[in-house]
Image (cartoon, helix red, strand yellow):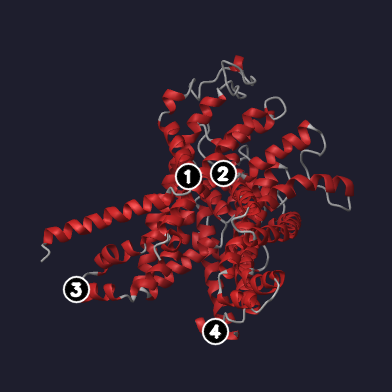
């Protein structure tokens, strides 16, 4: 166990090292001059020279990489070209919003998805199954940004029920906060409800076929007990993987919703940074996302082991 | 005694028989047929776009800007006076081309790398797998956006970048698949015959691990189209005048109140195309699975 964890951590460090090289190399190939991106086009040659040296652009690539990586280890990601503040401050203020939305939509989406998945598996082939499965498949195909636009049209612009965009913290204005939260949350949850429903259904169906379920039934256990105790316990294991993925893909997933509803989170920060060639911000966003997802994978592995004693990670090595 | 000719004939018949069985299993469910027809319809629309579109999709006419749906413009016009219906028809080209090309690129590259990793093992395996993990740790929309920022958008780049960002999935699957059959007797027999590594991989290992790849490909096309639409929506997809469903939604967003059709219809097209592709893909998956086909 300890050995496995160490090995896994070693691999993660290696992977993160590769990601950092990739990110740094990519961003140094970005077309356009970083000095102009930072200060605008109309600067004197002297100012240009000073900024050029400040950014270390006169030094070779490898020295710059080492300097950047050294800074990253001390939590220093550089200064944003667009906002002219420290990147770590910028991200700290943005990440809480994204995290908040991600947690809320998970808390809403997972139980509903699991419930729907169980219903479709238990009533397999019946009407409830075909309707729910159809809806889940449908929702899986809808572009998230388009759901947002439709919600905005019907709930905000047409009927005026909700404000069409923005984000307020609950301690600033609670009523406004709840109103502004509804549409982004629907948008973010629909996808996860659909995904979790499909996953739960297929993994539960896999388990329902097993011999021990037949045994449980034939020894006279009530169907409710069979499903809730025997089937669910094993059927829900793959859902853990999805939870890990979800955490990891927080930034990518919220990019569209945050852009549609103009929410100041990590996703919209990233989109803006890409548009404005704000290299330090892009680097930090990609690196942090990769780090979160690597850690999420490790946590998922460990959770698997806790939940399912049959999976022994030491033996599989 | 059976002659070689007869043997060949029976082999051919058997092949035809299994193909017939596959097609029968594929279209047994109406949904799959429906999906297949839908996909075919979209392909036809894309191919015949110049004939079907009533107007030039990129021709601007400021006097006709932001018209509501009417007889002359069935879905109205956008902010530059371009006909929305024509742009939607041409937009199908972008979605289909990017979806199919990206998946083809990912499949070829991923299959090859996965096979190499599993078959060669050792350092090749380590290098390929660690690189894949590095790529996989970045969400593919984020990775694609960063790559587009560097190499620029446009249809060709978009297809390559979206393809690259999904390569790791194929590599991992192919690697697992090859590891499973690497120890089989027929691979050993091939080796004893003196076949070279490349020939063994191409002739013996690849055909035996095709079906999971086909399943993965059919499921990926829809996903890729969704990602492409998303990127175009964020303004980092195909270059500006080209009609793409995602960018049309983004253009129409500002005029939602006056002309909702403009923003909402392209999204419906994305959804319908992806639904059809997924239905068809699920059909192929089920038909390729001998357990579900009823062979076992």
At 57% across and 41% down in the image, what residue appears? Answer: B271
Can you tell which mark lies on residue B231?
2
Pointer 1 residue: B158
**Comparing labels 1 and 3, the label whose residue is closer to the camera:** 3
**Location of residue B289 by image quarter:** bottom left
Whether B230 is drawn above or below A91: the answer is: above
Whether A292 is drawn above or below B192: the answer is: above
Q: Is the residue under label 2 in contact with that under label 1 (CB below 8 Å)?
A: yes
Can you tell which mark lies on residue B194?
3
Q: Nearer the viewer, residue B173 or A48?
A: B173
At 27% across and 73% down in the image, what residue appears? Answer: B186
At 47% across and 64% down in the image, what residue appears? Answer: B132
Numbered-mark total:
4
Tell me how far mark 1 sits from mark 2, CA to CA.
Answer: 9 Å
Mark 2 neighbour class, 10 Å CA radius: few under 14, some 14 to 19, many 20 or more = many
Tell me how far mark 1 sits from mark 3, CA to CA.
Answer: 42 Å
Residue A63 percent location from the top left of the image: 52, 63
Question: Tag 3, which chain?
Answer: B
- Which structural element holds mark 1? helix
- Which structural element holds mark 4? helix
Tell me how far mark 3 sits from mark 2, CA to CA.
Answer: 49 Å
Mark 3 neighbour class, 10 Å CA radius: few under 14, some 14 to 19, many 20 or more = few
At 41% across and 53% down in the image, what residue appears? Answer: B25
Pointer 4 residue: A314
**Comparing labels 2 and 4, the label whose residue is closer to the camera:** 4
Residue B111 percent location from the top left of the image: 38, 60
């Amino acid at each position: 166990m300890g050995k496995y964890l160490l090995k896994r951590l070693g691999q993660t460090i290696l992977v993160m090292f590769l990601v950092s090289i990739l990110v740094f190399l990519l961003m140094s190939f970005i077309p356009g001059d970083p000095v102009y991106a930072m200060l605008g086009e109309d600067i004197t040659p002297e100012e240009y020279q000073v900024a050029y040296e400040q950014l270390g652009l006169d030094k070779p690539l490898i020295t710059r990489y080492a300097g950047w990586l050294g800074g990253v280890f001390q939590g220093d990601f550089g200064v944003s070209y667009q906002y002219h503040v420290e990147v770590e401050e910028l991200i700290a203020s943005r990440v809480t919003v994204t995290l908040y939305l991600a947690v809320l939509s998970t808390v809403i989406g997972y139980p509903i998805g699991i419930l729907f998945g169980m219903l479709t598996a238990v009533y397999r082939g019946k009407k409830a199954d075909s309707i729910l499965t159809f809806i889940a498949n449908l929702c899986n195909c809808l572009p998230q940004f388009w759901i947002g636009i439709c919600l905005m049209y019907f709930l905000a612009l047409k009927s005026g029920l909700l404000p069409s965009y923005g984000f307020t913290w609950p301690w600033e204005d609670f009523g406004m906060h709840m109103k502004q939260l509804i549409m982004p949350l629907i948008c973010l949850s629909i996808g996860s409800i659909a995904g979790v429903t499909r996953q739960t259904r297929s993994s539960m169906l896999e388990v329902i076929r097993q011999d021990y379920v037949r045994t449980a039934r034939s020894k006279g256990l009530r169907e409710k007990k069979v499903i809730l105790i025997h089937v669910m316990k094993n059927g829900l294991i793959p859902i853990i993987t999805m939870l890990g993925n979800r955490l990891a893909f927080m930034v990518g997933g919220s990019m569209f919703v945050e852009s549609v509803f103009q929410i100041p989170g990590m996703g919209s920060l990233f989109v803006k940074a890409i548009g404005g060639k704000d290299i330090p911000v892009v680097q930090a966003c990609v690196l942090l996302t990769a780090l979160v997802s690597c850690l999420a994978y490790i946590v998922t592995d460990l959770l698997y082991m806790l939940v399912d004693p049959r999976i022994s990670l030491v033996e599989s090595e | 005694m059976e002659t070689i000719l007869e043997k060949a004939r029976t082999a051919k018949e058997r092949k035809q028989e299994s193909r017939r069985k596959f097609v029968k299993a594929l279209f047994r469910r109406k949904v799959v047929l429906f999906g297949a027809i839908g996909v075919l319809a979209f392909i036809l629309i894309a191919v015949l776009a110049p004939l079907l579109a009533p107007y030039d999709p990129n021709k601007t006419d400021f006097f006709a800007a932001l018209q509501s749906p009417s007889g002359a413009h069935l879905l109205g016009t956008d902010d530059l006076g371009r006909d929305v219906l024509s742009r939607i028809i041409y937009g199908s080209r972008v979605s289909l081309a990017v979806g199919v090309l990206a998946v083809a690129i990912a499949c070829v590259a991923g299959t090859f790398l996965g096979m190499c990793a599993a078959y060669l093992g050792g350092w090749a395996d380590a290098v390929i797998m660690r690189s894949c993990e590095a790529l996989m740790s970045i969400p593919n929309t984020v990775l694609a956006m960063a790559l587009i920022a560097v190499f620029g958008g446009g249809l060709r780049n978009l297809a390559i970048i979206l393809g690259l960002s999904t390569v790791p999935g194929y590599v991992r699957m192919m690697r697992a698949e090859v590891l499973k059959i690497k120890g089989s007797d027929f691979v050993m027999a091939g080796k004893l015959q003196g076949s070279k590594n490349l020939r063994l991989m191409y002739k013996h290992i690849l055909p035996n691990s095709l079906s999971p790849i086909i399943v993965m490909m059919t499921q990926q096309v829809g996903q890729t189209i969704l990602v492409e639409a998303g990127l175009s929506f964020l303004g980092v997809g195909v270059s500006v005048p080209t009609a793409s469903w995602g960018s049309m939604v983004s253009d129409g967003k500002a005029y939602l109140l006056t002309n909702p059709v403009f923003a909402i219809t392209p999204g419906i097209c994305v959804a319908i195309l992806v639904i059809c592709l997924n239905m068809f893909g699920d059909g192929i998956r089920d038909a390729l699975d001998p357990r579900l086909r009823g062979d076992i």
